[in-house]
Amino acid sequence: MTDSTVTSSALDRLTCVIPAGGVGSRLWPLSRANAPKFLLDLTGSGDSLLRATWDRLRPISPTDRIMVVTGNAHRESVQVQLPELQTNNLITESEPKDSSAAIGLAAAILELRDPDAIIGSFAADHVIRGDVLFRRAVTAAAHAADQGSIVTIGIHPSHPSTGFGYIACGPARNDIAPFDVYSVTEFVEKPDQERAEQYLESGNYLWNAGMFIARATVLLDQMAESRPELVTALREMAATWDTKKGAAVRECLWPTLEKIAIDYTVAEPAAAAGKMVCVAAHFDWDDVGDFASVANLLTRGRGSGSDLAVLGDGAQVLSDASSGIVVSESDRLVALVGVEDAVVVDTQDVLLVTTKSKAQDVKKLVERMRVTGGGHLL
């Protein structure tokens, strides 16, 4: 069997899963429980991040092999934004249980539909530029997954970011692919500035974009090594998914599931066991984690003097010698004079003012509001 035949076969068995959860608290007050980050247009393109993710995956997998996992509260919004999504490929959660449960349930359903199924998980709320390079990376990842590896896609860092996790890459895996595939030695949490600079200089570290590709059974078996009860429950729910008692089984089991990220149940243990490989990708990627990130995306490629990003239909902004970002959902005029790296978010009921350097701290404000009675604004 030739490499091209293996790759084609792998892509034919690849189902792309879009986990669409999380509010994106660093983007409050724009992103809220009833209008989470993935349902918003944060690039000014006219499409939500979810819709852009769907359109990016369509050249890779046909409509019947794209699944979405989201909360019950967002079912209708997802269906409106993705009218092509098949009903049997929409998985809804009664309450958030993090990525192990979300991706694991999708894998368990796929495992029953096709024992040789390959699952690829791609977040609903990331921005990617370079669709051809993205498809090339996914093709390589599917090829590696077809041979039994658990695969992640890493991004070549453009700067020493302290906002992303990192993947430590080992030797090239020429037995899997002639280039861009490496062993993963460990996953590293968000570093401080000094460590991030060391990672960038070494050339052996990639940003962790949270993309995972594997045979569905391989992923679940790896998860079961550390969380057997979780996987047993996921497979039990999958077994009754399309039956009359499926809803009752889910109602009984879902609240009991451990809330834990797939990084801890699959990625890190697989890397420690030598089962994880990484495709080093070359497309532009951003998780759009805060307003500083949104500002950088909107002003990228502009010349000097165009350092103020504006987001919002009909936003009225008057600026003199100012930079940063203004997001407006109101009809008020927002005026800035001599303010550098400002973040101004003006909604109907909340006005947020901070700076790009403090944009990540918005999450701390949200956490404080949650415990001090401001939950109605979240």
Image: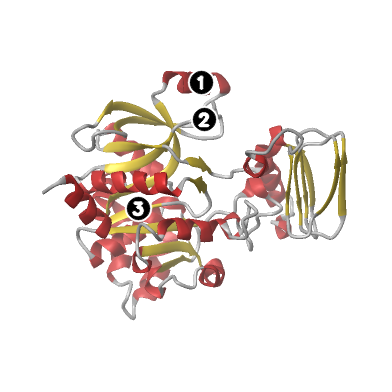
Spatial distance from mark 2 to mark 3, Cα to Cα? Answer: 25 Å
Whether residue 371 can be seen here: yes
Task: Tell me the mark number nearer the camera, choosing from 2 and 3.
Answer: 2
Tag 2 residue: 158
Tell me, for residue 26, which label it has, or none: none
Within 10 Å of disc 3 (Cα), the crowding (few <14, some 14-19, many 20+) is: many
Q: Closer to the N terminus: mark 2 or mark 3? A: 3
Element type at mark 3:
strand
Tell me, for residue 120, which label it has, or none: 3
Task: Tell me the mark number nearer the camera, choosing from 3 and 1.
Answer: 3
What residue is drawn where x is 20% and y is 58%? 116
Is 271 on the left-hand or right-hand side of 298?
A: left
Q: Give the x, y percent position of residue 359.
A: 69, 38
Q: Closer to the N terminus: mark 1 or mark 2? A: 2
Is 287 on the left-hand or right-hand side of 135?
A: right
Tell me, for residue 195, which label it has, or none: 1
**Colouring style:** secondary structure
Quadrant where the C terminus lies? bottom right
Element type at mark 2:
loop
Is the Cβ of the residue at disc 1 closer than 8 Å to that at disc 2? Answer: no
What residue is drawn where x is 35% and y is 65%? 62
